[in-house]
Image (spheres, rainbow, N blue to C red):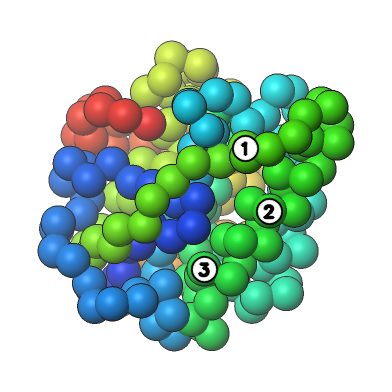
Amino acid sequence: MNMGKTLFAKSHGVSIVASSPLYSGHHVPPSPHRISRAFYHVTARGDRREDIFEGNPDRQEFLSILEQVISQFNWVCYAWCLMDNHYHLLIQTPDGNLSKGMRQSNGVYTQASNRRHGRVGHLFQGRFKPFWLTAMPTLARYIVLNPVRAGMTKKPADWKWSSYRSSEGIEPAPHWLAADGLLAMFGKRRSLAQGRYGNLWWTASRRIPLGST
């Protein structure tokens, strides 16, 4: 599956690790979040780096909201990972509506989180800055390896709150996750692709510097 040069961006409530070797560092044209069929690595972090997920009910709430946003804005989600104070998504936006979808997902989740925990005010922080992305399969592994790099688990399969287990075939994939689209990057046959995806995670963990998760 040849996706060519794809697009990475920061948008409302979105940030990146600009020093990662996965990104070329070249800025994209103005309003990249409006480009149709673009691919994005999206990560949103808690205000002052505070936790945005204070337990599994929060994570489940976020995934329910994400499912709704994917359907409403016609996104395609290839990978995701929920940490404590941030999350990662690998998505495609056929309708060029990243910014609108991010406002919806982060806004609705902020309201739900504030109600649950009796708070008011902002939950997320972030500034907008776009970058070109050049390595989709490597990035997909990078996203689900966050818990390993952070020392939260020894293997990505041990972390329930990412797309790794679904893509690897350990558990059924939710209907809103484009697991087959991701696996097509690793091989034509599903069993072969899952084997490559699962067996090469340790190689990716050694090739990608720890940096900031």
Q: Looking at the picture, how far across and down is residue 138, in whole percent?
A: 30, 50
What numbered label is drawn on residue 134? Answer: none
- CB-based contact (under 8 Å), mark 2 and mark 1: no
The answer to whether marks 3 and 2 mark residues whose Cβ atoms lie closer than 8 Å is no
**Earlier sequence position, callout 2 versus callout 1:** 2
- Report the residue at 51% width, 70% height from top: 98
Q: Position of residue 158 (x, y in %)?
A: 58, 24
Which of the pair 172/139 is nearer the observer? Answer: 139
Looking at the figure, which quarter contains the N terminus?
bottom left
Q: Is residue 38 above or below residue 206?
A: below
Pointer 3 local density, CA inside 10 Å: few below 14, some 14–19, many at least 20: some
Given the image, on which type of amino acid does mark 3 rest?
Ser
Which of the two residues, 199 or 160, is positioned nearer the viewer here? Answer: 160
Q: Quadrant of residue 70?
A: bottom right
**How many marks overall?**
3
Q: Residues within 10 Å of mark 2 (few under 14, many from 20)?
A: some
For residue 123, which numbered disc appears in the image?
Answer: 1
- Decide if residue 5 is on the left or right side of residue 67: left
Q: Which residue is mark 2?
A: 107
The x, y position of residue 184, in whole percent, is 44, 67
Q: CA distance from mark 3 to mark 2?
A: 12 Å
Tag 3 or tag 1, which sits nearer the N-term?
3
Residue depicted at 31% across the width and 29% down the height: 212
Between 112 and 55, the one lying in front of the other is 112
Check the image and report above or below for 118 versus 75: above
Disc 1 residue type? Leu
Residue indicated by mark 3: 99
- The residue sitting at 73% across, 47% down in the picture is 109
Specify the amino acid type for callout 2.
Gly
